[in-house]
Image (cartoon, helix red, strand yellow):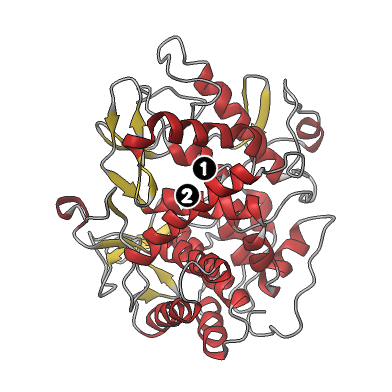
Amino acid sequence: MLSRRRFLSLASALPVPSRSAVPISAADDSFLEDLSRRAFLFFWEQSDSHTGLVLDRVGTAGAQNVSRSVDVASTALTGFFLTAMCIGSERRWMDPEEIRKRVRNSLRHFAYEQDHVRGFYYHFVNRKTGKRAWNCELSTIDTALFLAGVVTAHQYFKDEPEILTLASAIYQRVDFAWMLDERTGWLRKGWNPETGFLSGEWNNYSENAIFHILAIGSPTFPVPLRCWYLFDREEIEFGGYRYVGRGPLFTHQYSHAWLDLAGRRDGPPFQIDYFQNSVLATYAHRAYCLALRAMYPAYADDLWGITASDSEVGYVIWGSPTSRRYVDGTVVPCAAGGSLMLAPEICLPVLHNMYHQFGEYVYGRYGFADAFNPLTLWVNPDIVGLDAGITLLSAENLRTGRIWEWFNSAQCVQRAMNQIFESRTYSAPRSLPIIR
């Protein structure tokens, strides 16, 4: 565990701008508008209009790779879908009434039809029926990402009584306490009907912050506040940047897609600003890629980024600064795309460069291909939904902060945030009493 004094003494070797330090130019905004609309189109075209379940992956031109996908959706993607619909409605990328209908249909499906156990959902399911696929597990993180979209939709569609009621019912029936290991105090990663609880638990800082916030803030089946303080905060240092969390870059991005943690610190013994922590992780990741230039000379100040993605040998979870395993010079656009909200001053140049230098090959109907290798000229033929989703949400938070505004105004989120974090607080709109 990292002591309060030790963490507060950590300093980067190079200056790291604050979130508001870098203005976005008109050219940047125009570029992000195009990239974001394409990502939104992925969620509009690849989601089932009845269930709101979204294909886990499709080809860059939009066609399904039947041999790999078999109409399989990830439940986490519906959380990104619901959030994407809020963005698309606000920006009028599609008829708002059509968007509202899609959201309503999706919430109806999850409230009344989707298979679940105590409110938790299976990781992979059939896009049209919602039936469990591949004998997969009930996933706590996939459920949490889905719920993040549910809460966002609840706050955005505040004039729609049915959406408010459905969203509230879906969130309030999740038995978070069921996933608590009373022996360790850690929340479990999932459950399988054939074998019971998974052996893995959220025992170290990762993408789990969003799950813990939703679990602590639950009005029906909350977990105790102490759960936040029991998982380890392992210190990492690379290139002079010190932070907690040894996972790939996506583990520092997902929770921040919804949670606005800038300027907040949790209580003793940690007192960490997790937003700034993820900024440092992004800078460290750039330093990690640049340190590999002797082997992979394509990496540069404006061309870097590796996080869990496809590769020439299949899907790999790579990019942790503590390991060079699997690294082959591949670039993953969502590494920079998902950190736009964290460090735009170093991420925007990467996306611009990818577009101008490689766009003919890697930029298509739904934005950037999931991954490409500028040395071997391999380009992933697929778009992976999670990677399109984190890029869309991160870009919107950078441009407007709307997702942070919507999600963090929910009373359930405020309840958890105000228990855990010091300084800034939010005022809940009085007209939204349903999710409490």
Q: Which residue is mark 1?
A: 337
**Residue 263 to residue 79: above or below:** above
Q: Is residue 9 left or right of residue 276?
A: right
In this rendering, the label closer to the viewer, 1 or 2:
2
- Looking at the figure, which quarter contains the C terminus? bottom right
Q: Is residue 234 left or right of residue 55?
A: right
Q: Residue at x 61, y 75 (%)?
A: 156
Tell which of 359 and 256 is nearer to you: 359
Say if residue 413 shows up in the picture.
Answer: yes
Tell which of 66 and 234 is nearer to you: 66
Tell me the quarter of the picture where residue 333 sits.
top left
- Looking at the figure, which quarter contains the N terminus? top right
Residue 148, how many percent across, how many down? 54, 65
Secondary structure type for disc 2: helix
Q: Is residue 52 left or right of residue 87?
A: left
Q: Which residue is mark 2?
A: 35
Q: Amino acid at mark 1?
A: Gly
- Give the mark nearest the N terminus, 1 or 2: 2
Are the residues flagged by discs 1 and 2 in contact, CB closer than 8 Å? yes
Q: Residue at x 57, y 84 (%)?
A: 164
In the current view of this chain or complex, which residue is farthest to the bottom? 161
